[in-house]
Image: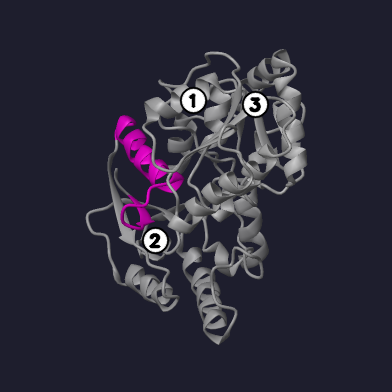
Amino acid sequence: MKIAVVNNCAPFVTGGAEHLASALRTKLIEHGHQAINVDIPFQWNPPQAILESMLAARLLSLVNVDLMIGLKFPAYYLPHPNKTLWLLHQFRQVYDLWGTPFQDLPSNEEGERIRKAVFAADNLYLREAKQIYTISPVTAGRLRHFNSLDAEVLYHPLADTSLLHNSGYGDYVFCPSRITRGKRQFLLVEAARFLRSQTRVVIAGPPETPEDRDTLLEAVEKHGLASRVTIIAEFIPEQEKAKYLAGALACVYIPWDEDSYGYVSLEACHCRKPLITCSDSGGTTLLALDRVTGRVVPPEAPALAAAIDELAANRQLASDWGHAAFDHMMRLGIHWDHVIQRLTA
């Protein structure tokens, strides 16, 4: 088949969704299909631009395409007679993030108008899809709760695991992710103040805004943590990231109510690293099973520090949980053959 993988994009911003869209195209081609990525620019600032992006997606058309696979808002509004969705997430700012510090929309008449418009459009256009899959039970649950739509969960694998390996359990924990409020790297920096062991913290990833970067750097300076916390506020090559993962004591991934387990969790499992996450981190707890494959702790700095210190004091425990994490991931059947079979059925 000729298949279009449709996603939205913000120029020069790359994250998990972009990696997944690219990997899906590659795997579709490997399975004998013709496939392209179609990326629709999405602007959310000023807020009025959200509605304009929704309209723009709706006014586009795909020709010479047998199957459209839509991934994110508002790209999944694009009309096509044979449309399947592999839903990464909706526009969470008007759903579960509304009324939280992560809302990022004005709590005024304009914000309410945008919220109602997104609700109405989702309720109408999501139903055009012949099949809806989501990447996690969390995303499926939100879809059911807010839009009364059922979806099958289809877990996303990594695109390439060839660089991932284990070189031991060193003296640092590693947190690779975009630096942004929702990923809560600031909580890990705060946890470093409570560490009793000599474990270091390494945070790596491009900041979403200069303010996100500065918040971390200022906290490190304020609390005198320069010898304890390393912040690499930029994109790091896959080879470098794999090296950090390979030597880490554990991988820390503590987003707020994440849609899925995230690439970070999968990378940790492939490297046989225990995963430390938080009880309110959402989809990460599919792979992070407390005291089985890692730790699931309250979103509090002392609790995070205690989890890190426990592993620092017992590296055999870190190894046991890390290998259990890999085994657990494999039992869940997270692999591309299954994904492609379902999406093209």
Extent of the magenta region: 5-32
| Disc on the earlier residue, 1 or 3 | 3
Q: Does any portion of residue 81 appear in the rendered image?
A: yes
Name the amino acid type tagged 1.
Tyr
**At 42% from the left edge and 42% from the top edge, which residue is drawn?**
20
**At 29% from the left edge and 53% from the top edge, which residue is drawn?**
38
**From the viewer's perspective, is residue 289 above or below residue 184?**
above
Is-magenta flag for residue 276?
no
Judging depth in this view, the residue of 124 and 91 nearest the camera is 91
Say what secondary structure mark 2 lies in: helix
Q: Quadrant of the C terminus?
A: top left
**How far apart are labels 3 and 2 at the CA level?**
43 Å
Q: Which residue is mark 3?
A: 199
**How far apart are labels 1 and 2 at the CA level?**
34 Å
Label 2: how many residues lie within 10 Å, few (<14), some (14-19) or many (20+)?
A: many
Say what secondary structure mark 1 lies in: helix
**At 56% from the left edge and 28% from the top edge, which residue is drawn?**
268
Q: Disc 3 vs disc 2: Cβ atoms closer than 8 Å?
A: no
The colour mode here is one colour
Q: Disc 1 vs disc 3: Cβ atoms closer than 8 Å?
A: no
Q: Which residue is mark 2?
A: 75
Judging depth in this view, the residue of 232 and 344 nearest the camera is 232
| Disc on the earlier residue, 1 or 2 | 2
Image spot of residue 335 (x, y percent): 50, 29
Name the amino acid type tagged 2.
Ala
> Among all residues in the image, which is located at the extreme left?
64
